[in-house]
Image (cartoon, helix red, strand yellow):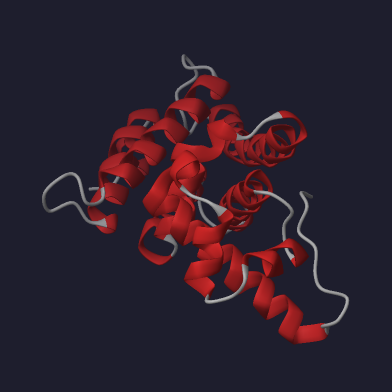
Amino acid sequence: MGELVSSPRTGGRRTFKRAEEIIDAAAYVFARLGYHGASTQDIADRLGIRQASLYYYFRSKESALEQVCARGVEGYLAAGQAAAEASGSQADRLRAIIRAHIEPMRERPDYVRVFLTLRRFLQGDARKRVKRIERRYERVIQKVVEQGISSGEFRDDLPARDVTLALLGACNAANLWQGIVAGMTVARAQRVVSTLVVDGLCTSKRGRHS
């Protein structure tokens, strides 16, 4: 996926670690300067390397943005799949998905901000590649909602697709509350979204948080 390449003159674990460092640096720069304000020179400066060295890892600024966005949504997908396969009720799984979606704002805030605010600048095949991962993640969530509706745990008057999009919209908005809403924490954002979305879906009080 994308144009991440490694130097033929290096190899093994060091190459992989260096690639991770470079994508981390790209996320840092994009999160602070925006897509149009950032340059590959800024990324190189962050790493303390020559700009030309970056071309071993990505060939353009858009390629760097694709890699950051892909890493961001792949993280959502992996965590969402794990939550969807965990034991418990469908409400428990949906709450776990919400926690997993908002938690990266604590651990990987640069990736979250870049994915949420800058992926719109991707074009052509790069946009399609990232969108495919997004759709896989959406299907994971939608399946949990559908199963909850089928079992009678969730109300059936709201289409599963609409619920999925509303949940993602709420989670994404909550991620952007950090640093904007006074006193907002990751845990508080998780609780607010979970209460509004999951408790609003449950057909019995037993499925809701007390």
Measuring 88% from the left and 76% from the top, which residue is drawn there?
A: 8
User: Left or right of 166: which side holds 81?
Assistant: right
Measuring 40% from the left and 58% from the top, which residue is drawn there?
A: 109
Residue 21 visible, this angle: yes
Closest to the observer, 97 or 17: 17
Determine the residue located farthest toward the left in the rendered image.
182
User: Left or right of 201: which side holds 19?
Assistant: right
Determine the residue located farthest toward the top in the rendered image.
157
Residue 186 position, x and y percent, is 29, 56
User: Left or right of 58: which side holds 149?
Assistant: left
Residue 101 visible, this angle: no
Does residue 96 lie above or below 205 as drawn? below
Residue 189 position, x and y percent, is 27, 48
Total numbered badges shown on the rendered structure: 0
Does residue 196 lie above or below 55 as drawn? above
Measuring 69% from the left and 42% from the top, which residue is drawn there?
A: 133
- Quarter of the image for residue 53 reads bottom right
Closest to the observer, 128 or 60: 60
Residue 73 position, x and y percent, is 59, 48
Does residue 70 lie above or below 119 as drawn? below
Measuring 33% from the left and 36% from the top, which residue is drawn there?
A: 199
- Quarter of the image for residue 149 reads top right
Determine the residue located farthest toward the right in the rendered image.
8
